[in-house]
Image (tube, grey):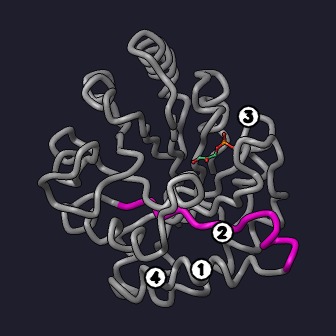
Amino acid sequence: MRQSLIVANWKMNGSIQNNQSLLNSFKQNLASVQHADVAVCPSFVYLQQVSDLLKGTVMTWGGQDLSQQNNGAFTGEVSANMLRDFGCKYVIVGHSERRCLYGESDQLVADKFAKAQSAGLIPILCVGELLEQREAGETENVVKRQLAAVINLQGLASLGNSVIAYEPVWAIGTGKTATPQEAQDVHAFIRRQVGEVAEKLQILYGGSVKGSNAAELFAMPDIDGGLIGGASLKADDFLTICQAAR
Ligand code: 13P
């Protein structure tokens, strides 16, 4: 059995005050989350605050992105070792907002994946197709290409120490969720691509997961949890999602 994992991706949201009340209220109910590990990925500037609030709990935290470089003159960038310094367990790489809005290529995402692993972070590799790609029947090709960039650079076995998040771009922040069967089909496809690590690889679904649809998504055999955007900013919704994990 794979352990379920629910990851909050706060994106560019939060404030010192809101983070504190959100996490304090979530922590009060943490004992009711019985079947999932839970991690929070805040904006970099709140990592210290989040680690202070979560230290001593079973929750973990991570970054939303990292640099492919080690250190040096790269204004505005954050390195893998810096994330380690702040106790991060995870780092998201290749989120569609990075790929689409900031032009991150498959190769750059693979380089970031490698850098994360070499620093001892667990990369959460995001893959997923655009609406026009889905409509053109290209979903599997797109996901396969995104995975291949990492496999070619790091080898198949490297995926055994990572998490994959399938996030169809058309379902992110739109309120339009993939149906459980649509998501399951792509998750099963991903699992077929990863050879010997298939059984242990956690594959999360992301894209408009809410308290009201989480249970049916997490009931699918190849969906091992979720990467949650908007609904992770509300303690009640996020709790309901975490409780829905199997
Ligand atoms: P939403 O849950 O807001 O659709 O965002 C999903 C996502 O992009 C998580 O990384």
Chain-order first, disc 3 or disc 4? 4
Q: Is residue 12 above or below residue 72?
A: above
State the extent of the magenta-drawn residues as a range: 123-136
Tell whether 25 sits left or right of 91: right
Q: Report the amino acid beneath label 3.
A: Gly
| Residue depicted at 60% across the width and 42% down the height | 228
| Residue depicted at 60% across the width and 39% down the height | 229
Mark sitting on residue 191:
1
Which residue is the site of mark 4? 149
Chain-order first, disc 1 or disc 3? 1
Chain-order first, disc 4 or disc 1? 4
* SS class, disc 3: loop
Residue 140 makes an appearance in the image: yes
Chain-order first, disc 3 or disc 2? 3
Q: Report the amino acid beneath label 4.
A: Ala
* Gap in angstroms between the C-alphas marked 3 and 4: 34 Å
Q: Report the amino acid beneath label 1.
A: Arg
**Looking at the picture, how far across and down is residue 151, in whole percent?**
42, 85
* Gap in angstroms between the C-alphas marked 2 and 1: 8 Å
**Looking at the picture, how far across and down is residue 54, in whole percent?**
32, 27
Q: Report the amino acid beneath label 2.
A: Asp
